[in-house]
């Protein structure tokens, strides 16, 4: 069986040593009952996998020394952001789990006109925590090297603005019949996955710039944003406003997909276009 892997916060590993606390330390000490000498994999968001040997395990905390650092090939060469209009019940959780497995880097829940699910602030807070836990579990299961993030709720207007600012922004709209997503992807993306992290970037002490949000290197990793509607779809007014904001309105084909299907299909198409689904 492979090493047990744990996502830890960027900056946890300094000068080749990790001081682990909280849930990760509890998992190692009390659940897995690992001992000094055992090895684990630490994922600190740098895109590298750090093989670490436990040197101390106590109720005060867990310490480990990094013995090997290797590049991971599990992160796509494109930063894929899925802006998903709020869905009822378990559907949102399905999108988060499957989207993480496919390779989505960030999820942004969106409130659009026809959202049936409109949680109150306290409920939304609880959901965001649960959603991040689902993403963490899916990321561990699928061997992601960087933990995808679930962002705060945005209005559709905010979503369009941030999506366009980040690069290629696509809105899946079932009323669009002329422009298919495939054509836009062929025009905009080339199948040349950027090896992530870029060789030579970063070190144990200072995580690769790729993980420091806003660092210049992120800008070199193309970002593609997808906007997917709720069960009732986007209104014509919303699609028009998105187009005026610079979002490309695209069809996913002549068949009407459920909202929870559409984002997963679009994400897969993007990562296939960039060569991130095995070439
Ligand atoms: N408005 C229709 C309805 O009420 O049945 C369909 C909404 S569809 C279930 C939910 C979302 O999935 C849409 O807002 C859109 O983002 C996406 N979607 C589903 N099928 C699509 C298609 N063929 N082309 C583009 N987007 C689609």
Image (spheres, rainbow, N blue to C red):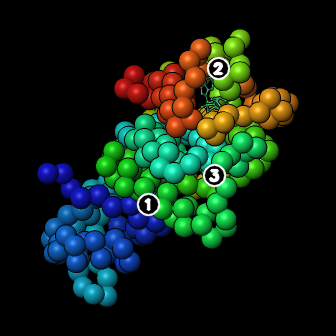
Q: Quadrant of the C terminus?
A: top left
- The residues bearing labels 1 and 2 have C-alpha atoms spaced at a distance of 32 Å
Q: Position of residue 72 (x, y in %)?
A: 36, 44
Q: Is residue 124 left or right of residue 235?
A: left
Upstream in sequence: badge 3 or badge 1: 3
For discs 3 and 1, the disc positioned in front in the rendered view: 3
Q: Nearer the viewer, mark 3 or mark 2?
A: 3
Q: Contact, CB < 8 Å: mark 1 with mark 2?
A: no
- Answer yes or no: disc 2 within 8 Å of ligand 1: yes
Is residue 169 at all visible to an observer of this figure? no
> Looking at the rendered structure, which numbered label has been put on residue 251?
2
Residue 239 seen anywhere in this rendered image of the structure? yes
List the residue tagged with mark 1.
133
CA distance for labels 3 and 2: 24 Å
Q: Position of residue 262 (x, y in %)?
A: 55, 31
Tag 2: Cα neighbours inside 10 Å, few (<14), some, or many (≥20)? many
Query: Which of the numbered marks, if any, corresponds to residue 1?
Result: none
Query: Could you tell me residue 183's position as x and y percent?
Result: 62, 13
Above or below for 115 versus 205: above
Disc 2 on helix, strand or loop?
A: loop
Residue where numbered disc 3 is placed: 117
Q: Residues within 10 Å of mark 3 (few under 14, many from 20)?
A: some
Residue nearest the observer in this picture, 210 or 75: 75
Q: Secondary structure at mark 3?
A: loop
Q: Secondary structure at mark 1?
A: helix
Q: Residue furthest bottom?
A: 60
**Residue shown at the point (56%, 38%) measured from the top left:** 80
């Amino acid at each position: 069986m492979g090493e047990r892997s744990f996502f830890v916060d960027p900056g946890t590993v300094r000068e080749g040593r990790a001081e682990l606390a909280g849930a990760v330390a509890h998992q190692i000490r009390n659940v897995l009952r690992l001992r000094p000498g055992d090895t684990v994999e630490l994922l600190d968001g740098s895109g590298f996998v750090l093989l670490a040997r436990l040197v101390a395990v106590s109720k005060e905390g867990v310490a480990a020394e990094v013995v090997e650092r290797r590049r991971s090939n599990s992160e796509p060469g494109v930063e894929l952001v899925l802006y998903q209009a709020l869905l009822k019940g378990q559907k949102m959780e399905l999108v988060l789990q499957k989207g993480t497995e496919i390779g989505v880097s960030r999820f942004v829940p969106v409130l659009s006109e026809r959202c049936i699910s409109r949680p109150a602030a306290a409920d939304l807070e609880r959901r965001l925590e649960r959603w991040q836990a689902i993403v963490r579990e899916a990321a561990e299961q699928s061997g992601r090297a960087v933990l995808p993030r679930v962002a705060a709720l945005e209005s559709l207007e905010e979503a369009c603005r941030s999506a366009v600012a980040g690069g290629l922004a696509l809105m899946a709209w079932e009323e669009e019949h002329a422009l298919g997503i495939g054509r836009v992807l062929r025009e905009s993306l080339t199948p040349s996955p950027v090896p992530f992290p870029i060789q030579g970037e970063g070190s144990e002490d200072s995580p690769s710039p790729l993980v420091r949000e806003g660092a210049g290197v992120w800008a070199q990793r193309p970002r593609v944003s997808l906007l997917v509607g709720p069960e009732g779809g986007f209104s014509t007014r919303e699609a028009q406003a998105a187009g005026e904001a610079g979002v490309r309105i695209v069809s996913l084909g002549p068949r009407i997909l459920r909202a929870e299907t559409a984002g997963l299909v679009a994400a897969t198409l993007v990562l296939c276009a960039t060569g991130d689904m095995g070439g």
